[in-house]
Image: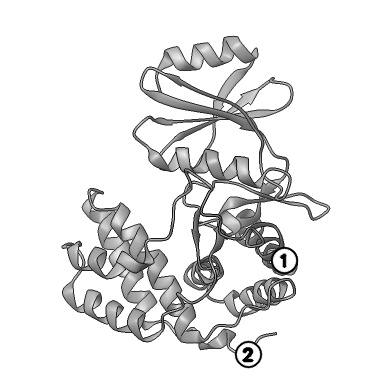
Amino acid sequence: MNANIIRALEARYACRLERLTGGYTNFAYLMAGAEPPLVAKVTNLSNEDTLNEIQVMKLVQGSCDTPSIHEVSEMEGMRIIVMDCMPGISAQSVLDAGDWARAEQIYSRMGHLLASQIHSQPYNQQEQGIRRSNRSALSQMIKKLEFVPGSLSRYSLQLLSAADAQDQPWVLTHGDFGVHNILCEEEGALHVLDWEWAEWGGPLSDVAWVCWFTKLHYPGQALKLNAAFVRGYLSSNPLVFSPQQLKAASLYKVWNVLHRLRIAPKEVQREWVRRLEWTLNEDFSDLHGIS
């Protein structure tokens, strides 16, 4: 990041910027010494995802435990968002440490939080600046991605058309909900981060993404964790879905990632094509009938 931006932020907030891990499309810094504790997210002005994130974070203030935005500014071709630094540790670190009992509790609370604090926001056509689901245009998107083998594209279209869930009323969806974007405190409080992929759309996309992520990265514990998550979700929102619809919603998310990777390095594209093939072959029926 430009040294002038770092110096300007450090002078303005009387702090020292320390680079945080994560963030593939932006730079994130802890503003050490700032009061209250703050984080700066810095991204190119051409990154429309951050504009989407700003609008969503404003919308959910007071209804969801997420950082408050203190300032949005522009400098030398970059957009700077200064927001609260939330307490806690990454929920994913609990899984990586193998603390499965605590992880199961987190998943249950995540389900309840998603249903009661995020999906409780019904679609509002008057709300400007928040992305809308591109599900209706997905078939055209799939046909245009030349780095994906045609056999996988055709099979995806077949499964998507056979298990459409577009009749679900639209709500606010996080877009990348999961342990990788949750901070958890020792006493159990959860904080939701990174709203760049949020959109108005069907609630099943968020539910499926959590289950997909867990099945992919933690297969040995996925059934127990996802069952806790789904039960927590259904306790606040009695969403009805089939295993086929869950897979279709997962495919929708994977294809949106693939669409974002049109100009990504070849090895990144190959990895996500592998994940697409895994999704097409994965069995999602293990969560059927959970209540």
Residue, disc 2? 289
Residue at the disc numbered 1: 112
- Helix, strand, or loop for circle 1? helix
Residue 76 on image: x %, y %: 37, 17
Q: Residue at x 51, y 12 (%)?
A: 8
Q: Amino acid at mark 2?
A: Gly
* Quarter containing the N terminus: top left
Classify 278 as above or below 87: below
Residue 205 is at least partly visible in this image:
yes
The location of residue 224, given as percent across then percent down, is 65, 78
Relative to 267, is 82 on the left or the right?
Answer: right
Q: Residues within 10 Å of mark 2 (few under 14, many from 20)?
A: few
Between the residue at mark 2 and the residue at mark 1, the CA separation in whole angstroms equals 18 Å
Residue 134 image label: none
Say above or below: 106 vs 153.
above
Kindly tell me whether residue 23 is visible in this rendering. Answer: no
- Outermost residue on the right side: it is 187
